[in-house]
Image (cartoon, rainbow, N blue to C red):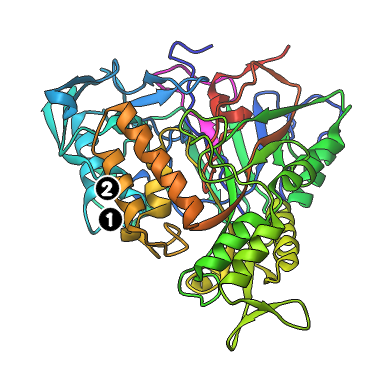
Amino acid sequence: MTARFLRGAAAVTLAAGLALSAAACSTPDGGKAATGRTDSAVVGIAYEPETLSPLLGYGKDGNSKIFDGLLTHDADMRLQPALATALPKITDGGRTYTFGLRHGVTFSDGKPFTADDVVFTYSTILDSRTNNASKAELDALKNVEKKDDHTVVFHLKYPYAPFAERAVLPIAPQHIAGTQDINHGAFTTKPIGTGPYVLTRWSKGEKLTFKANPHYWGGTPKVKNFTMAIIKDDDIRATRLRSGDLDGAILPPELAATFKGDKHRTTVTATTFDYRNVTLPTGNPVTGAKAIRRALDLAVDREAMAKGILNGAGKPAYGPVPTDSPWFAKGTERPHDLKKAERILDDAGWKKGPDGIRTKGHQRASFTLWYLSGDKLRQEHALAFASDAKKAGIEAKVESGTWEAIEPRMAKDAVLAGGGSPADPDFDQYLLLHSSLAGDGFNNMSRYADKTVDAKLTEARHTDDKATRKAAYDAVQRRLVENPAYTFLTHVDHVYVIADRWKGLTTQTEPHDHGLASGPWWNVEDWQPAT
């Protein structure tokens, strides 16, 4: 175990693409790394990041392997000091946060880390010219100032309860990133940080390779070489794991179950805030109709999806907040009720035609639903959703494609999407639902606009009183029953299969993981050899 706290914000399961072609195969039961070295690990991941710059959103929920934040999370998602020496001192009625910084920390190029880098990182993210889709999460931040080389002070516009959670943002080096084009410079693919690992190569669509940072302030990791193989297709990832090319991988529950009884591999399940939902674009005459949205919300059989598709590794989702979270609004669960869904459609004038699909005037109740190709969970959710919708007389025509193909169509076509952040309800719900972010990339993909929801989201982020925040988020969830923005389907547990070569494997409560992931390697820098 290293001298620092056990780390834990969402680590890097990054991904999309092809399998790792150059990995040397050890025998599947040999108990050695896929690379043939006992100080190395190769894991298979599902999504590839667009950037490795924290200024553009990389690692915003925590541990990124290359960087550190002022704070981090432990295994129980409690905030702990990282580049800061302690949790912040909060004054001025919750409007001022003061952090003391560690002495003697250097970036991997040997240059010292100071308060200037903290000021640079946060100020750059807030700059209107910076293409960071999550900057709305820092709306409360007025400015950050340097008191001295090892003290920074954040000044907020209003008390913002989850601000300390944003102190897990990775810190970028001013002396490198500050001399480049922030959005397109070399730093976006060749980053330098203070973290436990140094990126040695990023082969787009193939793999990311890291080596241990020998000068890391938390102690040199035992895993000296770490590779993330970018394998978009679930079946290929399972095949590579079975052949011995990979030491570990994230897999859909059904594929993970095929490794049951393998005495050389362990299956690890992590609870998450990760949901699957269907976007309902308001610009589409069908999905934009309130009666259609309300009917779909009742027509889907969430329990069947959780049992059949997830094999029990998850639960029904009635909104962005899991039912076992203290932030969930009790009473907003919606049972599967096809008859009520049909009554809603009948009353709104959507009448069934000879083929069983409804029409209203000249408008047929039909729309296209896209899912990411190679993603079995999304495919199965999309097909199950379409089947349930058809029973109510609504046609969802399922198509698959890459994000490059899907994104230009999101304004009119539905998407089998996902999201979820365990740190604070503001981080997910504001980006998901607030009308000011309608159509802003992958934020508010439904282009949803509801004055009540907007007001309650704003109220919840402008106070640090927990009871007031809980009441506001309860109101948002109740409003989504009356005026659905999306059809939420399931909350998905993450299932990993990994070789029994390391001890102390743990997981955290995990986020959705677009470009990032947690998994048993959230703290790979703390792994110890099993023998």
Circles 2 and 1, Cβ within 8 Å, touching? The answer is yes
Left of 136 or right of it: where is 211? right
Q: Secondary structure at mark 2?
A: helix
**Place of residue 170 in the rendered image (x, y in percent of width and height, measured from the top left):** 36, 36
Q: Which SS does the magenta portion mostly show?
A: loop
| Quadrant of the snapshot with the C terminus | top right
- Relative depth, front residue between 528 and 400: 400
Closer to the chain start, of discs 2 and 1, is: 2
**Place of residue 273 in the rendered image (x, y in percent of width and height, measured from the top left):** 54, 37
Residue 142, relative to residue 384: is it above or below?
above
Q: Amino acid at mark 1?
A: Thr
Q: Amino acid at mark 2?
A: Ile
**Place of residue 434 in the rendered image (x, y in percent of width and height, measured from the top left):** 35, 55
- Relative depth, front residue between 93 and 120: 93
Instruction: Give me the residue at 54% from left, 23% from top.
Output: 525
Which stretch is magenta? 210-223
Q: Is residue 51 magenta?
A: no
Q: Is residue 60 visible?
A: no
Question: Which residue is denoted by mark 1 in the rendering?
Answer: 130
**Distance between mark 2 and mark 1 Cα atoms:** 6 Å
**Place of residue 340 in the rendered image (x, y in percent of width and height, measured from the top left):** 65, 58
Instruction: Give me the residue at 35% from left, 39% from top.
Output: 472
| Quadrant of the snapshot with the N terminus | top right
> Badge 1: few (under 14), some or many (20 or more) residues near its Cα, within 10 Å?
some
Instruction: Give me the residue at 54% from left, 43% from top.
Output: 512
Question: Which residue is denoted by mark 2 in the rendering?
Answer: 125
Q: Secondary structure at mark 1?
A: loop
Left of 492 or right of it: where is 291? left
Q: Mark on residue 110?
A: none
**Quarter of the image where one finds residue 195:** top left
Instruction: Give me the residue at 71% from left, 64% from top.
Output: 386
